[in-house]
Each structure stands twice: as C-alpha cells, then as structure tokens.
Image (cartoon, grey):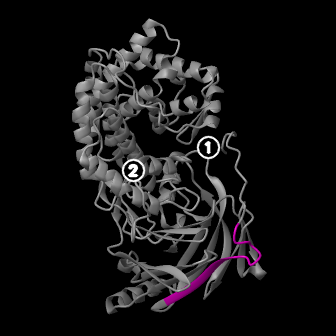
C-alpha cells in the first residue's frame, strides 16, 4: 500500500509540475563531468541498447518505442545516463540521436506521464540534461529550445516537491544533486539551490557514518554517492557558494575508505551487490575530491585490505547488513578477492540481479564467494522477498552474531586473522580464517579452521555428527576470474593459473581434503549473460572438534618481479 501511495503521489505532483513556469535559460552551466564510453556510444548509434544486462536491437526505432525487457532497463532509459556515451562519441550521428531522443521524450512524457517521474530518476535526468545541454540544443529552433527549458522547469519543481519520498541513500542523493544542479544553473530556479544544498548536507550526516561507509556496505554504491557529492561540491564552488561543512566532511571521510576498497587494478571489491565500477570512475572521483593520503587504517566499511608488491587482497570482515539495507546483501563473511597487477585472480561471482531472480538469489549465497562454507548452507540466511522499488527482494534475517578481524604480521609478511560464528547455532562450529601475504607480493598463504570450543558448541557439533555420521561436509571455494586459464597440475595435487599478463600462479594445499577444478560463473551487469569461469574447490568433512586445512598461492619461480602488461580487452565489441 505504501508503494502504491508513493506512485500515486509521484503521478499527482508530476501532473502539477506540468503547470509550472519554465526555466528561461542558463545562469551558468557546470562542465560535463560524467564519464561516457566511446564504444557504447557507437553501439547506441547502431541501435544496440544494452542496459541493465539486457540487449534490445532496434536500429530503426526511437528509444521510447521499444518494449523494455525489465524495470531496471526502463529506469536506465529514463535516467538518461546513456547520454554520457553519446557525448563521448560526439560526432554528428551521436548529436542527432541525443537531440531526437530528448525531444521525443518531452513529447511523450514531458507532461508528467510515464515511468520516469520518480525523484531519483528525474534527478539523474536533470544532471545529464544540464551537463550535455550544448549537445542537445546545438542547432535547435526556438520551439525546441522553449520545450527543453519548459521541461527542465517542470522536472525541477517535481523533484523539489518529492525528493523526501525517495529511499534514503543513493536514490535521495541523486534527487538532491539533480535539484541542486538545476537551482544553480537555471534562470527562475535559483530558490531551490539553497534548500537543496542544506538538505544534501543533512543527508551526509545521516547516511555517511563516521568511518566513511554506508549502511548497505556496497562499495560501488559508495562510489556513486561519492561521485554525486563531488559533482555537487564542484558546482557550488564554481558559483561562489561552496559546499556546507557536513557535505565537505563526508567527502573527506569517504575518500580513504574507497582507497581501501580499491584493488591494484583500480577496480572495486565486488561485494553486497556492487560491481567493479565503471572503468576510470574511481580514479577520477578520488582525484576530483582533492583529498590526499592513503587508505583507511584497519577496517574500511567492514572490509580488510592487504597490499604488497603487485598484489592486493580484500576480505569482507564484518557482519552483512540487515533490514532495508540488506536487500542486495550477500552471505560473504570472510570471503576474499585477490588481484595481481592489472589482473583479477580470485573473485566473487558478483550480483546476479540483472539476470533474473534465480541468479540474484544464487549470487548472494556463500558458495558464490571465495570462502569456506558448509555444504548446502550459507553463513547468513535470507528472509521472504518483499516488494521494493526494484522488484521483490529478500532481506537478510539471520547473520553471524560476531565477525571479528585483526591484522597480524612479522618481518617478511603481513596478514589477517578473522572469524565468525555463523555456523555455531546449527552445527556448533566456529570458523577462523588466516590469510598472509609476503612483502614482495608473490606468495599468499591461508589457513581455514572449523572448531567447536565451548561445551555448548561441542554438544551442537555432536548432534550434527549424529545427523552426518561421516562428518559435517564443507567446501573451500576460490572463484577465478574468467580470464584466468587454470588446469590441474602435479598429478592433481595443485592448480596452475595463468593470467593474460603472462604471470603464472600455483595453488597447493595441505590437509585432509579433495582438490577439484569445477565450473563457475562471473556475473557482470555490463554483460548479456553470466560468463563461464572456473573455481578451485577443496572438499572435506569436519570429523573432530577441530579441523584445519592449509593452502598456498604463489607465483611460479620463473615469473618476473615486474611484468609488462600491455594486453587490453577489445571494448568495441558487444560483451557476451
């Protein structure tokens, strides 16, 4: 009922905004700061519309006459983020598409109809229209110019009235940044700039915690929020106003957190619904912020990071989110990702939301992460799906009570020791993981322990053993990036892994386990379907109150210290 009431109120205020006075021109126009893709711009001009994991090929149609295959696809359409790609291409064909699709949107939906009238989508659209106004308006006649300014005024008024109805977090930051842009840029809309700047500052205090994190613990979402705050701060500075102190302080808190979540290849850790991030977005955002210094010491938004030589390791070392912040949360406690130079090696499968409900659920489970898991059981449990702005999503309802991590090390290595009690209530087994990285970055060593320590834990374990006479089965999984060429070696006792850079890594283990190389998947929202990959699996059974498996990952001896990695994927082709 609440969702239905929100939609009705959005429709009502969108209709009322249709009677608003238009903007009359630009006071000032922020420089375009959004990053587009030349290759994706070419795809758009050719009529290949790849949004939210879905491809629609319609070379002879307007964007607004195609049938969106999913609500997420439709939201991307109406948010106009694809305008960045047309601007990156920037030729006559791109300009023609930008102008025609914008004017066609105004004709069809400009009076308040259609799915694009939600405050966050409208805020996103305002940013793009203002950023790329020169591309849209170049050579247009007076009738088109008047329609453009009229629509900008209507959307500004709608967002001003409805931004408080958005969900806290990224949607509200999108709405307020769009409103601020409009208030600073458009004649007749100046009265909205001050309230928008103050509201943005309040949201910074409310949503960005003292350590520079957000409730969802989604690294990519944190980057999107950080990018919006940077844009808003720059726009305010350029008009001589400057951001509110709380706004600036939030940027200062987020920057070192994002540095801690950054792998050696410049990408983000892929946990809790987040992806690698648009190429170049993270580096640009950090440079734009003007915040110098290194990564956060200790945990950053609940993640721990080890980095040495050319190798980086990021571990999810905190409890998953719960409640409304957990609709995209993963059962990934103590999972790791490993990157060598520019090449991801060990990864998480990622978020499967763009590939349907079943893939979405599978991507959230413990077996989709590089971590130990009891066979058939996740370390956190999902509840029943509930309606959200992006369809039905299941919140986390059971998560580990305690997840702890601390850094260790000595003269030749650095490391992490972490543990969680997610399996204690049912099997009586606490999980402890130790991961160490050599100072030259060429060796990673791990130790996985399942233990029942207290009398109560041992009693639960005995009950679990009664149900599983052969021992409680578990698997330690290491999902490999699709570009890693892996094969069993040394008579099935090791796995050799070659990266596209030419580096060779060798995986070995010690303990009562069976080594396998199984199929896996890599889930990216920029792809049409899940990518085939492989995973290293160590399978064993917990027979006693303590079970320990050790493993190592080391560069082959003939792999040089410095690798000249010049190989680049062909970004001009549609991804499979």
Residue at the image position 30 percent from the left and 19 percent from the top: 187
Magenta highlight on residue 15: no
> Which is more toward the observer, 165 or 131?
131
Residue 315 in view: yes
CB contact under 8 Å: marks 2 and 1: no
Magenta span covers which residues?
Answer: 547-562
Image-based side of 557 in relation to 258, left or right? right
Residue 326 in view: no
The quadrant in which residue 398 appears is bottom left
Farthest residue in the top direction? 142
Residue at the image position 29 percent from the left and 30 percent from the top: 159
Above/below status of 7 relative to 415: above
Which residue has dot 2 on it?
Answer: 393
Residue at the image position 36 percent from the left and 90 percent from the top: 459
Above/below status of 546 relative to 335: below
**Label 2: which secondary element:** strand
Which residue has dot 1 on it?
Answer: 528
Farthest residue in the front direction? 240
The quadrant of the picture occupied by the N terminus is top left
> Which is more toward the observer, 44 or 209?
209
The spot of residue 154 in percent (x, y) is 31, 20
The quadrant of the picture occupied by the C terminus is top right
Image-based side of 184 in relation to 351, left or right? left
The spot of residue 164 in percent (x, y) is 24, 38
Dot 2 or dot 1, earlier in sequence: 2
Magenta highlight on residue 550: yes
The quadrant in which residue 413 appears is bottom right
The spot of residue 211 in percent (x, y) is 32, 62
Compute the Cα span from label 2 to label 1.
22 Å
**Label 1: which secondary element:** loop
> Which is more toward the observer, 401 or 19?
19
Residue at the image position 52 percent from the left and 41 percent from the top: 52
């Amino acid at each position: 009922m609440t969702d239905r009431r929100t939609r009705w109120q959005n429709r009502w205020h969108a209709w009322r905004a249709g009677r608003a006075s238009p903007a009359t021109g630009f006071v000032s126009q922020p420089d375009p700061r959004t990053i587009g893709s030349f290759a994706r711009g070419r795809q758009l001009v050719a009529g290949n519309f790849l949004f939210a994991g879905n491809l629609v090929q319609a070379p002879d149609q307007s964007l607004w006459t195609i049938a969106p295959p999913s609500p997420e696809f439709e939201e991307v359409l109406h948010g106009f983020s694809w305008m960045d790609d047309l601007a990156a291409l920037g030729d006559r064909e791109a300009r023609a598409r930008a102008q025609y699709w914008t004017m066609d949107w105004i004709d069809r939906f400009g009076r308040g109809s259609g799915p694009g009238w939600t405050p966050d989508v409208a805020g996103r659209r305002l940013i793009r229209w203002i950023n790329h106004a020169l591309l849209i308006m170049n050579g247009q006649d007076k009738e088109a110019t008047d329609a453009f300014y009229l629509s900008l005024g209507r959307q500004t008024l709608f967002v001003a009235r409805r931004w408080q109805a958005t969900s806290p977090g990224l949607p509200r930051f999108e709405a307020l940044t769009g409103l601020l842009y409009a208030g600073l840029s458009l004649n007749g809309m100046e009265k909205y700039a001050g309230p928008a700047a103050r509201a943005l500052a309040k949201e910074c205090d409310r949503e960005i915690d003292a350590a520079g994190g957000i409730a969802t613990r989604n690294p990519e979402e944190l980057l999107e929020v950080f990018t919006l705050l940077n844009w808003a701060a720059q726009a305010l500075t350029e008009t001589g106003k400057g951001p509110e102190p709380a706004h600036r302080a939030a940027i200062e808190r987020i920057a070192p957190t994002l540095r801690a979540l950054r792998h050696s290849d410049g990408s983000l850790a892929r946990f809790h619904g987040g992806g690698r991030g648009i190429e170049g977005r993270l580096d640009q955002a950090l440079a734009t912020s003007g915040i110098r210094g290194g990564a956060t010491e200790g945990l950053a938004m609940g993640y721990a990071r080890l980095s040495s030589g050319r190798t980086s390791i990021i571990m999810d070392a905190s409890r998953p989110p719960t409640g409304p912040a957990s609709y995209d949360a993963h059962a990934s406690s103590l999972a790791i990702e490993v990157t060598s130079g520019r090449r991801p090696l060990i990864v998480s499968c990622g978020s499967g939301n763009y590939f349907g409900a079943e893939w979405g659920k599978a991507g959230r489970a413990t077996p989709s992460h590089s971590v130990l898991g009891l066979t058939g059981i996740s370390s956190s449990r999902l509840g029943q799906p509930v309606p959200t702005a992006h369809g039905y999503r299941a919140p986390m309802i059971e998560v580990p009570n305690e997840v702890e991590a601390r850094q260790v090390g000595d003269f030749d290595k650095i490391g992490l020791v972490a543990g969680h009690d997610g399996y204690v209530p049912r099997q009586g087994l606490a999980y402890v993981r130790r991961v160490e990285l050599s100072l030259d970055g060429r060796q990673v060593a791990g130790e996985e322990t399942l233990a029942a320590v207290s009398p109560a834990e041992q009693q639960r374990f005995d009950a679990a053993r009664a149900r599983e006479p052969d021992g409680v089965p578990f698997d330690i999984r290491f999902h490999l990036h699709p570009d890693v060429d892996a094969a069993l070696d040394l008579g099935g006792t090791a796995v050799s892994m070659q990266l596209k850079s030419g580096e060779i890594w060798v995986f070995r283990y010690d303990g009562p386990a069976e080594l396998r190389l199984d199929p896996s998947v890599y889930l990216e929202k920029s792809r049409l379907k899940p990518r085939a990959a492989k995973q290293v699996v160590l399978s064993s059974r917990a027979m006693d109150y303590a079970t320990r498996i050790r493993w190592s990952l080391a560069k082959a001896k003939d792999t040089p210290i410095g690798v000249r990695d010049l190989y680049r994927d062909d970004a001009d082709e549609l991804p499979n």
